[in-house]
Image (cartoon, rainbow, N blue to C red):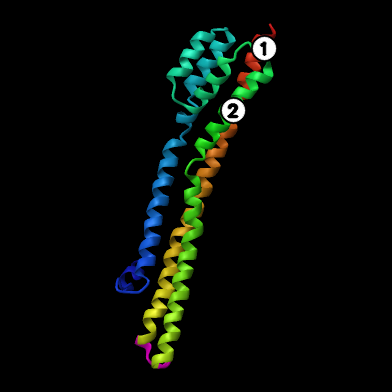
């Protein structure tokens, strides 16, 4: 890595490609950190909240449960609120409301992850673009100076190699980061769905009594 910066010339024709790749890497990193913060289990499925809401519904304390859901800003609280608002209605109606809000919350948990995926796909292509551009410059230099002039060839070869290196340097961590945050979001979505089904069973049980 140190060798890259020590030998790279900012006067190189591929500088703007490297800078564009660097800018995309900053965007991907910002999204990754934001998703790590947003996808904390304590923020999505607060343990204390889930325990309280189960107890309240079991004791048929529906007004208190509604108030608790309204004061909690977690995705699971918003889903539980949707189910509690139709408490006492047929199971199909309760399920429909839970699923409707659940789809919205699932999409929100996966928000911005596509940005990381785009960066992971685009940056190696940008590096490849720099490679092709550099090789064109190499062939142009060969045509003008012949193969014996190493200095004339160095610029094109440098552009070809450095842009490819920069693209891969960003794309590989971006792929890993995208896989990580997506897996975490999907795991939380599954846990939320499990809680929603449990709530549906609790509401249905109260409805049947």
Above or below, 81 against 40 in this view is above
What stretch of residues is rendered in magenta? 146-151
Residue 12 horizontal/vertical position (percent): 33, 74
**SS of the residue under disc 2:** helix
Instruction: Name the residue at 45% across, 85% down.
Output: 139
Q: In this orientation, which residue lies closer to the viewer: 162 or 66?
A: 66
For marks 1 and 2 on the same chain, the one whose residue lies earlier in the sequence = 2
* Residue 27 horizontal side relative to residue 89, left or right: left
Above or below, 98 against 36 in this view is above
Q: Is residue 78 shown in magenta?
A: no
Q: Nearer the viewer, mark 1 or mark 2?
A: 2
Residue placed under numbered mark 2 in the picture = 100
Instruction: Name the residue at 49% across, 65% down.
Output: 125
State the image quarter where residue 91 is shown. top right
Residue 23 horizontal/vertical position (percent): 37, 57
Residue placed under numbered mark 1 in the picture = 205
């Amino acid at each position: 890595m140190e060798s890259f910066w020590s030998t790279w010339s900012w006067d190189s024709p591929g500088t703007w490609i490297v800078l564009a790749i660097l800018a995309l890497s900053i965007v991907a990193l910002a999204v990754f950190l934001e998703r790590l913060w947003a996808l904390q289990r304590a923020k999505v499925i607060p343990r204390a909240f889930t325990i309280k809401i189960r107890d309240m519904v079991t004791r048929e304390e529906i007004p208190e449960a509604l108030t608790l859901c309204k004061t909690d800003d977690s995705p699971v609280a918003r889903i539980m609120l949707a189910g509690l608002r139709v408490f006492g209605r047929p199971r199909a109606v309760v399920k429909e409301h839970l699923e409707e809000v659940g789809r919205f919350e699932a999409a929100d948990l996966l928000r911005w992850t596509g940005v990381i995926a785009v960066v992971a796909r685009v940056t190696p292509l940008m590096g490849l673009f720099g490679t092709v551009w550099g090789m064109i410059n190499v062939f142009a230099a060969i045509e003008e100076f012949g193969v014996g002039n190493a200095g004339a060839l160095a610029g094109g070869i440098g552009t070809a190699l450095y842009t490819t290196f920069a693209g891969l340097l960003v794309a590989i961590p971006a792929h890993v980061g995208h896989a990580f945050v997506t897996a975490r979001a999907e795991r939380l979505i599954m846990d939320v769905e499990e809680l929603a089904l449990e709530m549906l069973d609790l509401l249905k049980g109260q409805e049947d009594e």
